[in-house]
Image (cartoon, rainbow, N blue to C red):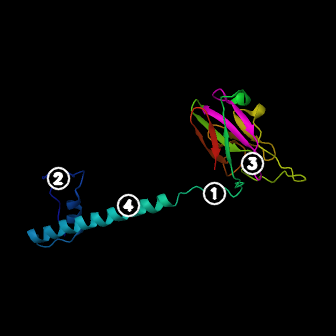
């Protein structure tokens, strides 16, 4: 024999069933007294605390497990370049959407600089992020090419296209996006570094 809940009272958290009603349904019927109802309420509050704590703990554990995988092909080159993108030498970077190649020290294969907007630049390594040594011949390895592929950087060896706006893969099969470097621009000088 089970207690049939009374829905006549309105509880602020009353959806279809309140938690009190669920406890009344699930717990066997004894002679209900004020003391047993108090115990049921306390049990419910403790259960809410425990489930709330477990939920928060689960969310924290899950958020800690979604880290991005680090690209093992990152050249780990020391990059610290400062240029004046407003000068005539870097004329390609004077307008939004402009791009150009810069040389850098090995093991980097060079840098692609892209003007994202008036105050932001993006810089990517020219080393293909996926299978970079597939097409190396006599110490000379492939580099990403922009040229006719603009607004994409293209890996001719692995046939993968990357979007310059965010470095993501647009066409082809690969696991990693472009290898990106940090940039700061103060209105006159652009610094590219890692």
Q: Which residue is mark 3?
A: 128
Q: Which residue is mark 4?
A: 56
Q: In front here: 19 or 50?
A: 50
First in residue order: circle 3 vs circle 2: 2
Mark 2 and mark 1: Cα distance apart in space? 51 Å
Q: Nearer the viewer, mark 4 or mark 1?
A: 1
Q: Nearer the viewer, mark 3 or mark 2?
A: 3
Q: Quadrant of residue 182?
A: top right
Residue drawn where x is 37% and y is 65% of the image: 54
First in residue order: circle 3 vs circle 1: 1
Mark 4: few, some, or many residues within 10 Å (few <14, many ≥20)?
few
> Does dot 4 land on a helix, a strand or a loop?
helix
Mark 3 and mark 2: Cα distance apart in space? 62 Å
Q: Disc 3, disc 1: CB below 8 Å? A: no
Q: Quadrant of residue 172?
A: top right
Chain part drawn in magenta: 93-116
């Amino acid at each position: 024999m089970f207690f049939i809940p009374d829905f006549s009272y309105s509880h602020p958290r009353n959806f279809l069933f309140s938690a009190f009603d669920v406890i009344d349904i699930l717990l066997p019927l004894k002679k209900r007294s004020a003391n047993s109802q108090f115990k049921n309420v306390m049990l419910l509050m403790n259960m809410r605390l425990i489930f709330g704590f477990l939920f928060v703990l689960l969310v924290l554990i899950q958020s800690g497990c979604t880290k991005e995988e680090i690209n093992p092909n990152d050249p780990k080159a020391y990059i610290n370049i400062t240029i004046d993108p407003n000068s005539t030498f870097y004329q390609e970077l004077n307008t939004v959407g402009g791009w150009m190649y810069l040389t850098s020290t090995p093991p980097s294969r060079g840098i692609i600089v892209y003007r994202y907007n008036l105050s932001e630049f993006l810089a990517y390594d020219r080393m293909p992020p996926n299978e970079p040594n597939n097409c190396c011949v006599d110490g000379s390895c492939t580099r990403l090419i922009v040229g006719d592929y603009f607004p994409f950087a293209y890996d001719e060896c692995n046939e993968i296209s990357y979007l310059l706006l965010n470095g993501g893969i647009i066409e082809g099969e690969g696991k990693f996006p472009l290898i990106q470097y940090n940039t700061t621009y103060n209105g006159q000088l652009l610094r590219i570094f890692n």
